[in-house]
Amino acid sequence: MGAPVGNCLANYWQVWAGCGFQGIDFTVGTDERNPIMTIFPQKTPAALANITAEQRSTYKSLVAERVIDVSRSGYPFTSPYTLFRLYRRNIIWHTQKPREAMLKSRDAPSKQWMDLVQSDRVAVVHLRCNKETRWAPDYGVIPHYFVLDNLPASVRQVILLGLPSIEDTSDMCGIAAHSLKARLAARHLEVVFRTNGNYLADWWLMAMANILFCWPSTYCATAAYGNPSQSLFLAVVGCASSVTATSKAWHGRDLALAPGIHFIETHFLRGFEHLCTNKLSREDFER
């Protein structure tokens, strides 16, 4: 699968934003393990950073208040104060710009799938389920209410997107996914699994989806940040999960709050506490 897409892109954006706000040229080395990185600009002169006066003013005030994180390494989504959150307008532009090139690549999703996810009658739900979900303390199973309580009334079909493990009913992630499918079907919604896509095609589908739900996952969160839709729902668990909401200290600053992204505070069932011992009950995630 290559290097993790989510953290690669988040770190790329953090450095890119830092160069832009500091007025220095941006250059990054290509990560050959991760083809998606070659799609984004490898060099951006400071003069082309495209930062508005309003963005720069917001940046200066946050620096003065000491409520911004300008570090250039690590896991940017785990901090509520990271600089790239101010740069979302630019992130959307740079994500959508290479779409034509992406459509011609061998990693492109099919036209049928692309047309499907751009409908207001279809919601994509990314279920993050792999070894980190089972063992890492900042990943886990998200209860159904995250989707059920926020699903737009226009939706008639739900795509459950993830690795093949989400269809494995011997695994607690799979049990949770099938339970969610049943709850959605009870609302007379059509539910399909997509588990056979390659990781680049799936990332692009999420970046184009009109309605997107993300379990804690930087893979899904970066796709949401590059998506211009107004119906993007990211599950967050305070500062305990791999993705955090923008700091409340930034509230009232529209540029910082990523229009279209709705951070939904929830709880999760941590994999290392539940999944590896199979002690998770249906009641835990069916609430």
Image (tube, rainbow, N blue to C red):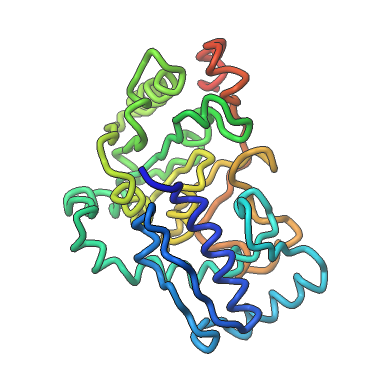
Q: Quadrant of residue 197?
A: top left
Q: Quadrant of residue 204?
A: bottom left
Q: Quadrant of residue 279?
A: top right
Quick check: 121 above or below 8?
above
Q: How many marks?
A: 0
Residue sitting at x 17%, y 54% = 111
Image coordinates of residue 261 in percent, x first then y, are 52, 55
Residue sitting at x 41%, y 39% = 126
Image coordinates of residue 198 in percent, x first then y, are 28, 44
Quick check: 265 above or below 23?
above
Residue sitting at x 56%, y 24% = 271
Which is nearer the eye, 100 or 210?
A: 100
Image coordinates of residue 28 in percent, x first then y, are 49, 69
Quarter placement of the N terminus: top left
Quick check: 287 above or below 91?
above
Which is nearer the eye, 205 or 21?
A: 21
Image coordinates of residue 230 in percent, x first then y, are 45, 58
Extreme right residue here?
65
Lateral position of residue 135 relative to residue 173, left or right = right
Quarter placement of the C terminus: top right
Quick check: 29 above or below 1?
below
Residue sitting at x 48%, y 28% = 131
Lateral position of residue 188 relative to residue 151, left or right = left
Lateral position of residue 225 relative to residue 37, left or right = right
